[in-house]
Amino acid sequence: MKIKMSLIYTSIFLLAFTSCKSSEAQSRQKLVNESKDKIIEENKWIAATIESAMIENNIPAVSISVVRGGAISYVDEFGIMKRGSEKKIDKNSMYELASIAKTFTGIITNYLIDEGKLNLEEPIITYLDNVLTKEAKENLKNVQLKHLMSHTAGIPHRLCSIYNKQESNYTKGYTEQEFINDLNKIVLNSEPGEKFSYSSSGYNIAGYICELVSGQSYDELLREYVTGRSIKYGMKNTVISLNEKQTNNLVTAYRPENRSKPANVKTDWGKAVPASGTYSTVTDLSKLAIVQMRAYQDYKTNGIRTPLILTDFDEITGDYGLGLIKGEKENYTFYVNEGNNNGFRTLYLLFPDYDIALILFTSSGGPWMGPLATEIYHKLIEMPYSKPKKSLAQSFIDIIQNENMETGIQFFNKHKALGTYYLSEAEMNQVGYALLKMDRIKDAIEAFKLNVVEFPKSSNAYDSLAEAYLKNGNKKQALLNYEKSLELDPKNENAKNIIMKLKL
């Protein structure tokens, strides 16, 4: 009888245990299915949001990748390779990364620091001793490597002369001798460590120093420490020189101020590669995001630093580390870098606490992309978000290009009064200069006039209007506006100099 009862109890226990296991498995599967359904719906929302933004802003191409849970979860492409072509972009479409190249230079620098070849607090003249003149060494004697990496060296942003080349499809490169010549002309804008002043040229100097101390070319360093041999990210399409297949996959870029006209493109950056000259795909950059987020997660949990940790240095103050910016909100920390050049605009955004990354590329940047990216990442990390107003300046120039100035002014005045768009003095100034570049001088004057009406206390607004009048040959109006600019800002040396010349 005892045996029978024991068997009964055992049977009941096994039945209950089996039932419990079955119930747990069903619950887990339900959660998995709900998670899958949620992600599918989220991806559909992202696609619809991007398509809406593209239509609204006349954007030819956008590529996106989302990393979730340590893997590439969503990749999508929207638009065409080139206006007038039916060829759609795909997962192999290449974009110029612009300033995201600085993140690669940061990783390379960090590896060389680990190897004892570089020191953040070493004066850069130590590394550049054989290429600098005596005068240049004196000018740069207080600049340390950390100043270059954190944009606090006082190096002029456009010191490297390649940034001033305006030829369409510039292919002449930027030689070492040209770079050294520019290096020896440096006059610092501020004392090293005094203030943040963004400088692509500073990162090119850092990249050149990496070449000197390693004895390798930047291309070799990129492959050694970022895209291939050492870390094995498998980033086969992240390059500084495009092969024939990659050239055919390079998306045509369009200037934000004129989205119907291809942008001027530099396909050979030479010694400006470390700050500006790499190409990639969203899939390739996602591979880096996966391992870099894992590195930050390990750093937070175990305090383990690797060369992928590009922030939180004792030697560097501020949020900008080695090619990556650390941002902190009330509920989360993020790491970001973005590029904006020759029409291309690119975003690299990590949320290690959420195990989520967002990679977003477009062939025609402008103010529209920031709000789009912000809306998408708030959806991904499930944070509340109120969609901001659109840029009045951007809509204004779009209407001018598609219709005429009169229609643009009517639109501007109407929506300024209604308050349905936000208005930025800087963006309106950019509109004026964009029109000057298109040789639409009279239209530029009208745009600058709107800006001084809306921002009557801005010295810069009057200075820009004066410049446009002068370019149009109206010296009287130019003088009046330069004098107004100087009245508002007595330190405006540019206005002082031009006023003296106009009064001769």
Image (tube, helix red, strand yellow):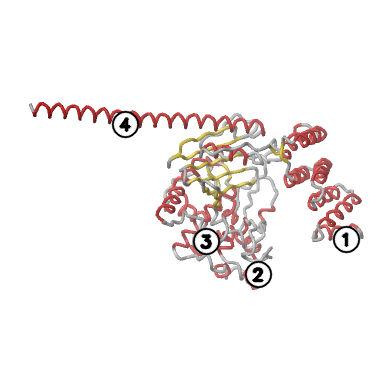
Callout 2, which amino acid? Asn
Q: Which residue is at the front of the view, 379 or 40?
A: 379
Q: Amino acid at mark 3?
A: Cys
Measure how far apart labels 1 and 3 are at the Cα level.
46 Å
Which residue shows up at 64% across the image and 71% down it? Answer: 133
Vertical position of residue 204 compared to residue 92: above or below? below
Q: Which residue is mark 1?
A: 500
Q: Nearer the viewer, mark 4 or mark 1?
A: 4
Q: Position of residue 181 (x, y in %)?
A: 65, 63
Residue 206 or residue 383, whichever sits in front? 383
Q: Residue 24 got which mark?
A: 4
Which circle, 1 or 3, is nearer the viewer? 1
Mark 4 vs mark 3, foreground winner is 4
Give the residue pinned by disc 2: 139
Residue at coordinates 51% horizontally, 54% vertically from top-left? Answer: 219
Q: Nearer the viewer, mark 4 or mark 2?
A: 4
Query: Real-space Cα distance between discs 4 and 1?
Result: 84 Å
Q: Are marks 4 and 3 in contact (CB under 8 Å)?
A: no
Mark 4–mark 2 distance (CA, rounded to whole Å): 70 Å
Numbered disc 3: secondary structure: helix
Residue bearing the label numbered 3:
210
Residue 371, how many percent across, how many down? 62, 39
Mark 4: few, some, or many residues within 10 Å (few <14, many ≥20)? few
* Precedes in sequence: disc 2 or disc 1: 2
In the structure shown, which secondary structural element does the residue marked by tag 2 occupy? helix
Q: Secondary structure at mark 4?
A: helix
Q: Are marks 1 and 3 in contact (CB under 8 Å)?
A: no
Which callout, 1 or 3, points at the residue further toward the start of the chain?
A: 3
Mark 2 is surrounded, within 10 Å at the Cα level, by few (under 14), some (14 to 19) or many (20 or more) other residues, namely some
Choose mark 2 or mark 3, whichever is in front.
Answer: 2
Q: Tag 3 or tag 4, which sits nearer the N-term?
A: 4
For this orientation, the residue located farthest to the left is 1
